[in-house]
Amino acid sequence: MRLTLFSFLYKIIRKISIMLYSFWSMLMGKPFDLETISDFGNRQLSHLDSMPFDLFYSFSIPNGIITSFLNYEFKSPLIAASFQPDKKALSRWLRFGLGGVTFKTMMLDPQTGNERPRLSEIMVNGKKSFINAMGLPGEGVQSFVNTILDENIFPREIPLGLSIGGDNKEEYVQVFHDINRKMSSIYSQLFYELNISCPNTNDGKMLSEHPDDLLYVLSKIREESQCPIIIKLSPDQDEIEILRMIETIKSVSDIGINTGNTSYMSREKAGLNEYNFKPVGGGVSGPSLFLKVLNMIKLLKPFKLPIIATGGIDSGEKAKAAIHEGATLIGMASALVIDPYCIPRINQYLGIHK
Ligand SMILES: Cc1cc2nc3c(=O)[nH]c(=O)nc-3n(C[C@H](O)[C@H](O)[C@H](O)COP(=O)(O)O)c2cc1C
C-alpha cells in the first residue's frame, strides 16, 4: 500500500515538475535541458534524507534474496548501474533496497563532458527511454575519492562498484591506482568496473577494440589488488569481437561481465534536433535494451563468468528472466530515475518467486 502510494506520487510529481520546467524553458526562450531538472529533483529529494523518519524510502529486503557474487555478499541482487553522479541519491537508493551501487565512471581529471542539452527522454517502441551523450563529465578521481571519504555516507561493508574510464590504457591504470590506494583499506567490498563501452567520448571504446591493452590494464590492477573486476560491454559490440575479447581475458582471476552500456542512436533517429540535443547522437537506455541483454547472457554462458545483467530491467519479471538465463546481479539505471520504488517492488517479487 505504502509502496503503491509513494510510487504513484513520485511519478506524478516528476511528471508535473518536467512539464512546469518545460513550460518555463519555452517562456524563457531556452532549450529544455532534462539534466537541469534532474539535478534540481535530486537536491529537493536530499532534503528528505535528513528527516527524522524514513517512511518515504526505507524498505526491508526480503530474506532469501541474498546473492553471492565473486565472493562478495549482496543483500539483494539489484544494484545501481554506473550513471548517477549524485552520491546522496545512490545512498538513498541503498535504503530503498539495493544490494550495492556502482559510481558514475571516473576519469583521471575533472571534465565538463559534451555540450548541453545532452540528455533527453524519448519513446522507443512505445516505451519511455533515455538518450544521453553526457561524455563522462565528472570531478576527476582525486576529488571523487576525497568526497567519498569526507562525506562517509556509504556503509563500509556495502559492495561499492568503482567504474573506471580513461582516454588511454595508462589513464585507466592511474584512476584505478588512485582509488585503490585510498579506499581499499576502508571499504571491505570494493569492486572495479572497467567502462570500455562508452559511446559518447572519442576513446570510450578504445580498450574493447584492443584486447591486448585491456589485458595490460587487468594485469596492472592484479599487481595491486585481488578485488573483483567487471568488464562492461556494449550492446552494439560485434559478437565475434566480444568472444575474442572474452577468450583473451577469461584467465584473469575474479573477473565478471556487465552485459550492457547504452546503445548508440543518431539524434535524428531519436526524433531530436540540434536545439534540444546538441551532440549528433547518443546512447539509448531503457526497455529496448532488454532483449539484447538476454542474448548477451546466452552468448556468454559457455564461459561460466559471473554476469551483471544491465539494460532495460524495470520489473520483477525481467529481473527473474535475466537471473534464469544465468545472470547473478541486476544493474539498473533508467528504471531508478523513472521510479525508484521499482527497487522494493522487484525485491518483493524476487523474494516470492525464488
Ligand atoms: C544519463 C546516463 C549516464 C550514464 N553514465 C554512465 C557512465 O558514466 N558509465 C557507464 O558505464 N555507464 C553509464 N550509463 C549507462 C548505464 O550504466 C546503463 O548501462 C545503461 O543505461 C543501460 O541500463 P538501463 O537500461 O537500466 O538504463 C549511463 C546511462 C545514463 C542514462
Image (tube, helix red, strand yellow):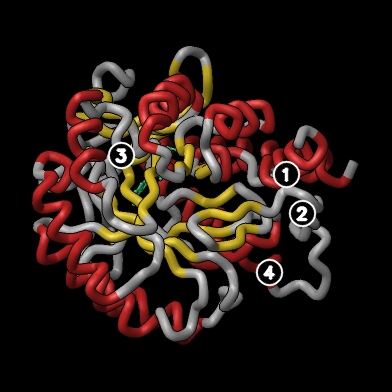
| Mark sitting earlier along the chain (4/1) | 4
Q: Nearer the viewer, residue 137 or 297?
A: 297
Gap in Å between the C-alphas at discs 2 and 3? 29 Å
Does the CB distance between marks 1 and 2 fall below 8 Å? Answer: yes
Does the CB distance between marks 2 and 3 fall below 8 Å? Answer: no
On the rendered structure, is 110 left or right of 45? left
Which residue is the site of mark 4? 49
Question: Considering the numbered disc 2 on the image, is that residue within a helix, a strand or a loop?
Answer: loop
- How far from the left and from the top, in percent, is residue 316? 68, 32
Work out whether 285 lies above or below 3: above
Work out whether 226 lies above or below 201: below
- Name the residue: 22% across, 41% down: 200
| Mark sitting earlier along the chain (2/3) | 2
State the image quarter where residue 258 is shown: top left
Give the crowd class for mark 4: few <14, some 14-19, many >=20 residues within 10 Å: some
- Name the residue: 26% across, 27% down: 236
Which residue is the site of mark 1? 347
Residue type highlighted by circle 1: Asn
On the rendered structure, is 37 left or right of 257? right
Residue type highlighted by circle 4: Asp
Residue type highlighted by circle 2: Ile
Gap in Å between the C-alphas at discs 4 and 1? 22 Å
State the image quarter where residue 224 is shown: bottom left
Gap in Å between the C-alphas at discs 3 and 4? 34 Å
Question: Considering the numbered disc 4 on the image, is that residue within a helix, a strand or a loop?
Answer: helix
- Name the residue: 62% across, 41% down: 14
Q: Which mark is residue 233?
A: 3
Which residue is the site of mark 2? 61
Question: Considering the numbered disc 1 on the image, is that residue within a helix, a strand or a loop?
Answer: helix
